[in-house]
Amino acid sequence: SFHFGIGVLISFPLWYIILFIVGLCLFNWWVAVIGLVVYPVSFLIYLRSKIIVKKQLLRFRRFGMWWRGDTLYHKAKELRNNIIDNLNKII
């Protein structure tokens, strides 16, 4: 995870710097500037989609455990419900 994060923080800006230079060489200057403006937006979309994909994979995993009737899943769900009930009693 750490290596992946460092790779994203280095490779993502590096890619856009390369695109900026190519845009300056092959196209007009305003095409390159548009690329630089789009960079922060696309980076935020990437980060958000990464979170959404992780959550969806965990939902699939949880559904698979429920479908198979995994006892560990049912025990964890029961413990979670007990904790929530106890917290509700306190409040």
Image (tube, grey):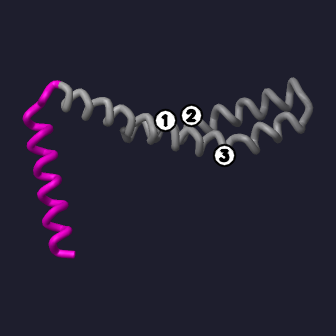
Q: Main secondary structure of the magenta part?
A: helix
Q: Which-is-in-front pick, marks 3 and 1? A: 3
Number of residues whose C-alpha sits closer than 10 Å to that of mark 3, classed few (under 14), some (14–19) or many (20 or more): few
Disc 2: which residue: 11
Instruction: Tell me how far mark 1 sits from mark 2, CA to CA.
Output: 6 Å
Which of the two labelled residues, at mark 3 and mark 1, occupies the earlier sequence position?
A: 1
Asked where in the image residue 39 lies, by quadrant, the reply is: top right
Asked where in the image residue 4 lies, by quadrant, the reply is: top left
Asked where in the image residue 59 lies, by quadrant, the reply is: top left
The residue at the point 31 percent across, 36 percent down is 58
Q: Is residue 43 left or right of residue 88?
A: right
Disc 1: which residue: 7
Task: Give, as a three-letter code, the residue at label 3.
Answer: Pro
**Magenta-highlighted residues:** 68-91
Task: Give, as a three-letter code, the residue at label 2.
Answer: Ser
Q: Is residue 61 above or below residue 55?
A: above
